[in-house]
Image (cartoon, helix red, strand yellow):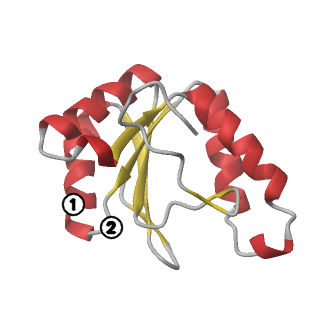
């Protein structure tokens, strides 16, 4: 997905389906909260190229595309329930920050930085697991 900010990465996918291994997905009550969190992470030393705010309409578009691929045989391990959960939150107006932070310490530090900014929850996608950080 191409974003409006020049530093926004393509949405992390594999074979057309959301696949954020090595990323932390943070969900905020509003897009404004998510943008403030993105800026706070950058202000606290995270690389601008590793942190992106995705508006709820961007998330909706991406996850609706992902849902089309869920029935593909290669996607048997895909977290279908997660896609549906994020899609529902986006439709409710939540904003998202996706941070490339494969190291555990960086992921936990990021959550501490954004916790006061309306963080609903955060999840780190490891190779085989999803870790609740908030």
Q: Position of residue 33 (x, y in %)?
A: 36, 25
Q: Residues within 10 Å of mark 2 (few under 14, many from 20)?
A: some
Q: Position of residue 85 (x, y in %)?
A: 65, 47
State the residue position of label 2.
102
Check contact, mark 2 vs mark 1: CB within 8 A.
Answer: yes
Q: Quadrant where the N terminus lies? A: top right
* Residue occupying the point 53% across, 30% down: 94
State the residue position of label 1.
106
Which residue ends up furthest to the top in the rendered image?
32
Is 134 situated above or below 59? Answer: below
Query: Residue 89 versus residue 36: which sits nearer the camera?
Result: 36
Q: Which element carries disc 1, helix, strand or loop? A: helix
20 vs 114, left or right, is: right
Q: Residues within 10 Å of mark 1 (few under 14, many from 20)?
A: some
* Residue occupying the point 39% across, 39% down: 52
Which residue ends up furthest to the left in the rendered image?
44
Q: Which element carries disc 2, helix, strand or loop? A: loop
What is the CA distance from the residue labelled 2 to the residue labelled 1? 8 Å
10 vs 104, left or right, is: right
């Amino acid at each position: 997905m191409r974003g409006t900010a020049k530093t926004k990465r393509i949405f992390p996918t594999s074979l057309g389906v959301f696949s954020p291994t090595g990323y932390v997905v943070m969900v905020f009550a509003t897009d404004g909260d998510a943008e403030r969190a993105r800026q706070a992470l950058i202000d606290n030393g995270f690389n601008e190229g590793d942190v992106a705010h995705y508006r709820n309409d961007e998330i909706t578009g991406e996850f609706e595309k992902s849902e089309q691929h869920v029935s593909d045989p290669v996607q048997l391990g895909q977290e279908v329930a997660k896609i549906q959960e994020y899609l529902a939150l986006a439709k409710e107006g939540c904003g998202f920050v996706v941070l490339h932070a494969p190291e555990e310490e960086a992921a936990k530090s990021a959550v501490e930085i954004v916790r006061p900014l309306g963080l609903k929850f955060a999840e780190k996608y490891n190779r085989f697991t999803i870790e609740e950080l908030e």
